[in-house]
Amino acid sequence: MSVISSPASSESSALTDSRLAALCAGTVQRAFLDYDEQFHAITLRARDRFLARDWRGSYADAAERLHLYAREMEELTKQIKDALRARLCVRSVWTGMKAAYSSLIAQSSKREIAESFFNSLTRRVFATEGVDQAIEFVDTDFDEPPTTVPVDTRRVYSGASIHELLIASLTDPSAGFSEENWRALDITARHAAERLQAAFSTSPQESPANRRLKLEIIGNVFYRGRGAYVVGRVFRDSDDRSPLAIALCLRHENETGIDFDAVLIGETDLAILFSFTRAYFRVYTKCPYELVRSLCEIMPRKRLIDLYNAIGYHRHGKTEFYRDFVRHLRSSGDRFVTAEGARGMVMLVFTLPSYDVVFKLIKDRFDYPKESTRAEVMRRYRLVFEHDRIGRLVEAHEFEHLRIARDRFEPPLLEELLRDASSIVRLEGDDVVIAHVYVERRVRPLNLFLFEADEAAVAAAARDYGRAIKDLAASNIFPGDIFTKNFGVTRHGRVVFYDYDELCFVTDCNFREMPQPTTHEEEMSAEPWFSVRQNDIFPEEFPQFLRLPEAARSSLLAHHADLFSAAFWRSLQERLRAGELPEIFPYRAERRLA
Ligand SMILES: Nc1ncnc2c1ncn2[C@@H]1O[C@H](COP(=O)(O)OP(=O)(O)OP(=O)(O)O)[C@@H](O)[C@H]1O
Ligand SMILES: [Mg+2]
């Protein structure tokens, strides 16, 4: 990390407020540029890692990039505290600083990210309750987008068969893969072209083969884990108003070349690829604003928060969430209520029916038999943030000092919040102030879903529930509590996990078979007659505790009976300990082209 210069504290005491504000604004801007440069450097490495099949390096880069922001912010906070000293909490200095900073970033193509960077600093210093436009960019200072000239080019391919267009887009030098990098591209592209042709509903007059398609591709390749993705749209003709979203999924498992592994067609497939339950992509961009707007055109149902997150700007994602949430509160009138489903023993969970997120607070005291502590629960949530969420762990965004009008809460909920989370919830005038909360996407709790959906949907969800446990396990996560109340179903029908307070690494568990009783007393004993240590787990016992409707139970056992044997888990532990890296595709096997 480069050293960021700031006014030396001995000099700063002699400066006027406005001069000091200007100098500090410069310090913040330099810190932002430093962060941006490092973010870029890591992101740019993604292509080399992919070409070299350096997966360990790829995961290490992803982890390093996640920590970058907090590291930079810590260093900056120290410097600003040192420079402002006695004037640290003088608001007029901060309003001056904000104005000076705003003009410094006016020309930046990452202005919105730079604004959020400033907000992170103010919130660290002031622990701002609610928000304060005078010292934070609650709303952006700019009406215009950060750049008027498109900087991230979209590439358009037309005038040839779809098969040729696909090959042209993948071997375009600007994508970074030359023609000799590929394996069997001609055949896979042919399969992909057939699927694309078929995806456009064919009217009798129109033979699909004759149709002239146009391919529009976002010029930046998206890298994540062991995959690379080229994303865009296919148009039937130049004024097609409902183009198809597509993603071309690349793998490099074999040293002889890159495989065009799968084609994803349609918004649902793309939404699953860009899900809030996955790690962030590394994708080079000069202008996140523009990239996010391009993604919005492809996936109009995605929120800005999800798209900024998806490309690695999760702090700015929070700003976008907050703006959207405030707008929503102004334009709605419903009240916050307790979330549906089984009450948490550790978390207090509420939601606004008209807005699809849940708010999760750690209770002051946990119900028996939970023995954890607040710090321990927070540690597990942080672990999830840092872990590859592999499409099965809901992302939890941490917010501090959230202020919401009191009359938006149903009275029983408010009473409960003030009673069971009094250390982090208080009333201030007409507002409720929440010191610490996790915000997650709302999903349908699986325990409810299994008793309300039709039989086919229940069987499919139960099967995916088993798959979810296996995916988590492959990434070394044991959910701790595998009850269906801790899983939910997304709008795309995928089963995901959201209860993190007992989550642990598979390699830290001790999976055991149930000991066989050898005496009559042992056999008749209601309590375990053998000693059980804290991390002992008896998979054979799981089915007995799961309350499942018959369709779900038979589907789960038909597809995933192995989950209920200690041998399955122990053999997985061996593979994990030998350093095997998870390979969990963000698409279904049917989407693959080989
Ligand atoms: N993302 C979510 N979407 C929808 N509902 C949710 C979500 N997260 C939690 N809930 C609801 O809130 C309840 C409590 O949440 P959670 O399971 O995280 O808390 P907990 O206290 O850790 O639970 P437990 O008592 O099982 O340990 C869940 O049972 C579920 O009904
Ligand atoms: Mg729970």
Image (cartoon, rainbow, N blue to C red):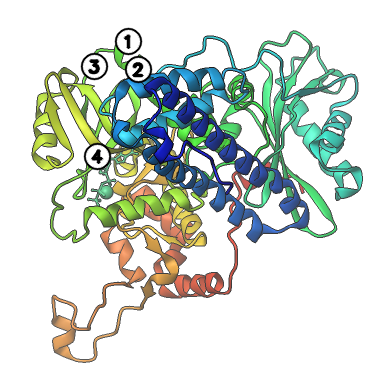
- Do the residues under discs 1 and 3 have CB atoms within 8 angstroms? no
Residue position for label 3: 334
Q: Amino acid at mark 4?
A: Gly
Front tag of 4 and 2: 2
Q: Name the residue nearer the viewer: 68 or 82.
A: 82
- Do the residues under discs 4 and 2 have CB atoms within 8 angstroms? no
Mark 3: few, some, or many residues within 10 Å (few <14, many ≥20)? some
The numbered mark, 2 or 1, whose residue comes first in the sequence reads 2
- Whether residue 305 is visible, yes or no, is no
Numbered disc 2: secondary structure: loop
Q: Vertically, is 167 above or below 431?
A: below
Numbered disc 3: secondary structure: loop
Q: Amino acid at mark 2?
A: Ala
Determine the CA span between mark 4 and mark 1.
Answer: 27 Å
Is disc 2's CB within 8 Å of ligand 1? no
Q: Name the residue nearer the viewer: 85 or 288.
A: 85
Mark 2: few, some, or many residues within 10 Å (few <14, many ≥20)? some
Q: Vertically, is 258 above or below 87?
A: below
Determine the CA span between mark 1 and mark 3.
Answer: 10 Å
Where residue 158 appears, as percent x and y from the top left, is 86, 20
Front tag of 4 and 1: 1
Where residue 586 appears, as percent x and y from the top left, is 59, 45
Residue position for label 4: 341
Residue position for label 1: 331
Residue position for label 2: 134
Please give left or right for residue 317 compared with residue 251 in the image.
left
Q: Vertically, is 166 above or below 289?
A: below
Quadrant of the rendered image containing residue 160: top right
Is disc 4's CB within 8 Å of ligand 1? yes
